[in-house]
Amino acid sequence: MKNHLPVLILAFIVGTVASGCASRSPVEKRIDKNPALFEELGEGDKDLVLDGEVSEGMSRDAVFLAWGRPDVVRSGSREGKGRERWGYFDRTAVHTASVGFGTYGPSPFFADFGVHPRYGYGVGPGWGYGQDLDFGSRLERSVEFENDRVVAWETRR
């Protein structure tokens, strides 16, 4: 009988590492990919980033680490100062259903035959019912920068 202990230990280690990677938050993954950006932050900003929060005075890099890459970036000006706004959207599933009523007549081409080769008979009333799943986007969060620092931010309640 073979000794299965080394195989069991290896399986345990692989399982532990794999489960640890799966449970990592998006913030932790961004920090791991950009350690230099995280190290340059002040202690207060580091705590906010780790919590996934944004505050006035934070840098663009801190917002990127906390919230990720924005879905839309808008640039502009207010009172002669350049501004930039980052928008983050939430994509939600939207279920739709529709019912239609109507009539249809024969196609002149198939009138001699009385039946459409693909769609069946071509005379009479008709109705239809359909369901669909679509994805709608809505603005979930936004942050506004002036001189590369946060001057305003919003989140959806």
Image (cartoon, rainbow, N blue to C red):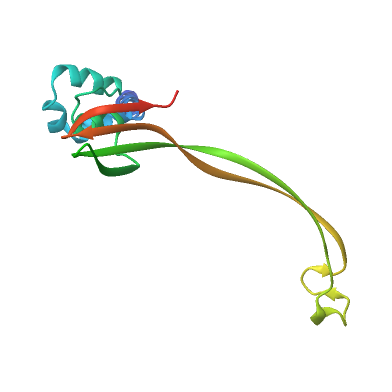
> In terms of depth relative to the viewer, which is nearer, 8 or 110?
110
Q: Quadrant of residue 57?
A: top left
Above or below: residue 69 compared with residue 16: below
Determine the residue positioned at 34% across, 32% down: 142
Residue at the far front in the pictured view: 79
Q: Quick check: can you spot residue 40?
A: yes
> In terms of depth relative to the viewer, which is nearer, 72 or 40?
72
Q: Is residue 93 left or right of residue 157?
A: right
Q: Is residue 15 left or right of residue 47?
A: right
Q: Position of residue 102 (x, y in %)?
A: 81, 58
Q: Position of residue 148 (x, y in %)?
A: 17, 34
Q: Position of residue 27 (x, y in %)?
A: 28, 28
Q: Position of residue 105 (x, y in %)?
A: 84, 70
Determine the residue positioned at 32% across, 30% down: 26
**The N terminus - image quarter:** top left
Q: Quick check: can you spot residue 1?
A: no
Q: Is residue 95 left or right of residue 114?
A: left
> In terms of depth relative to the viewer, which is nearer, 62 or 21?
62
> In terms of depth relative to the viewer, which is nearer, 3 or 26?
26
**The C terminus - image quarter:** top left
For the image shown, how many numbered marks are present on the structure? 0
Determine the residue positioned at 29% across, 38% down: 85
Determine the residue positioned at 58% across, 39% down: 94
Q: Quadrant of residue 29?
A: top left
